[in-house]
Amino acid sequence: METHGITEYGSDATYWLTAHDAAYYAATATDPHALDSLLAGYTVFNDSRIETDSLAAFAQLTWNITDRLHLTPGLRYTHEEKDGVYAATVTGGLATTNAALLARRNGVARPQAYSASISDGDLSGQVALSYDISDNILAYGSWARGYKSGGINMAGIPNLPSGAPSLTNATVKPEVATTYELGLKTQLFDRRLTANLAAYRTDVEDYQANVVDTGPGALRGYLANAKKVEIQGVELDAFARPTPWLDAYANLAWTDAKYADFANGPCPLELIGSTTVACDLSGKDLPGVSPWAASVGGELHRDVNGLGYAGEAYFGADANYRSTYNADASVSKYTEIDGYTVLNLRAGFRADNGWEAFVWVRNALDEDYLQLLTVQAGNSGLVLGTPGDPRTFGLTLRAKY
């Protein structure tokens, strides 16, 4: 696979993407125009090529030890080879020989070239034991070992103090996850209610995390390995059909996810200084994971004739909640996203002959919330956010033949 990209910075880029500290003002004292034009017209050309060869073999079987006790083992072997080449060249921007200004500009994007390759394989698998307590209640326990192949960073990596690419960061180690799970699957009240409960623990070795280069000449985000991550939680989901005209569901999840060992992690924005290299994030919450998440919803539907067609009219609602979580790998206090709830509504008609029409409202309560917060590479102090969609109305027409 090959990619070719061009990024050009405008006249406002200098203000937003460079740190305006005392050292910067000292560097621009002899050239005040640099305050506004250091990045104006600065253009980066990126070229990358990666080739991947992947082979896998797997097998799984179920042994019915008794009519009620079942054992399901499985194995998978995966082998992957990857070769990548990356090159970035730059042109334009303020014409200057000031070393401090050039360092600031390279902190946004710099010329760089490197190649890397990896070759690894892994044997993963699972063992699950299940028992039918009754015809409608199943208890199970499982152990599983999962594997995520290593990778090559194809969008730039940190530089060494000498200015050469840090090739140890060019590749990412494979990620190995070991999961233990206990659970119940039930169908109750003449199968009008389906309820499932699961408790699990996952240990991840060499967790692949998105980080931001905070060293000299910081460039952008890249993948790195956290030595160990621990995740545990409990999940409950239920679906009910108490009457022929009502469907309802509810899900609740509690998750405790942490960096168990990440001594060389990226530093949060508030701790980055001129000599900062890495920070110990061990014990910090894993980004992107809410301790609590829940959803509830349902649909009312009745058989009717609409516009001369037999079919079903319906009205549905879905509410989704997640508690406060941190969105950035560095777990900065500036990238914490407050919890929020989003309500979606829909109403429509499904014809028996295959067509459907419905109106919908997403984020019906017009909740203000963020989906993502991340720190801009280069440590300018800029934090970028992606807001959730505001209240949105729509009409959908659908047909099947």
Image (cartoon, rainbow, N blue to C red):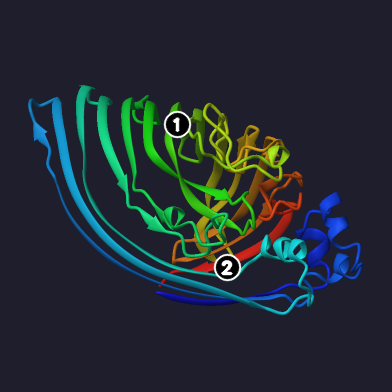
Q: In front: 184, or 354?
A: 184
- The structure residue drawn at horizontal position 51% and vertical position 38%, both measured from the top left corner, is 264
Three-letter code, disc 1? Ala
Residue 197 at x, y percent in the picture: 39, 26
Mark 1 sits on what residue?
238
Residue 394: percent from the left, percent from the top? 68, 62
- Picture coordinates of residue 14, whole percent (x, y): 80, 65
| Pick the front one: 219 or 298 | 219
Q: CA distance from mark 2 to mark 1?
A: 30 Å
Query: Local crowd at mark 1 within 10 Å, few (<14), some, or many (≥20)?
Result: some
As drawn, is 71 to the left or to the right of 269? left
Q: Earlier in the sequence, mark 2 or mark 1?
A: 1
323 displayed left or right of 245: right
Whether residue 208 is visible, yes or no, is yes
Q: Is residue 140 above or below residue 388?
A: above
Q: Is residue 195 above or below residue 48?
A: above
Q: Amino acid at mark 2?
A: Leu
Where disc 1 sits, the SS reads strand
Q: Image point 42% across, 71% down: which residue?
A: 85
Judging depth in this view, the residue of 401 and 127 nearest the camera is 127
Left or right: 100, with 48 as reference point: right
Q: Residue at x 79, y 54 (%)?
A: 19
Q: In the image, 24: left or right of 109?
A: right
Q: Position of residue 232 (x, y in %)?
A: 43, 27
In this rendering, is residue 279 above or below 371? above
Q: Secondary structure at mark 2?
A: strand
Tag nearer the camera, 2 or 1: 1
Residue 21 appears in view: no
Task: Give the label on residue 115, or none.
Answer: none
Which sits in the foreground, 114 or 44?
Answer: 114
Quadrant of the snapshot with the N terminus: bottom left
According to the image, label 2 marks what residue?
Answer: 397
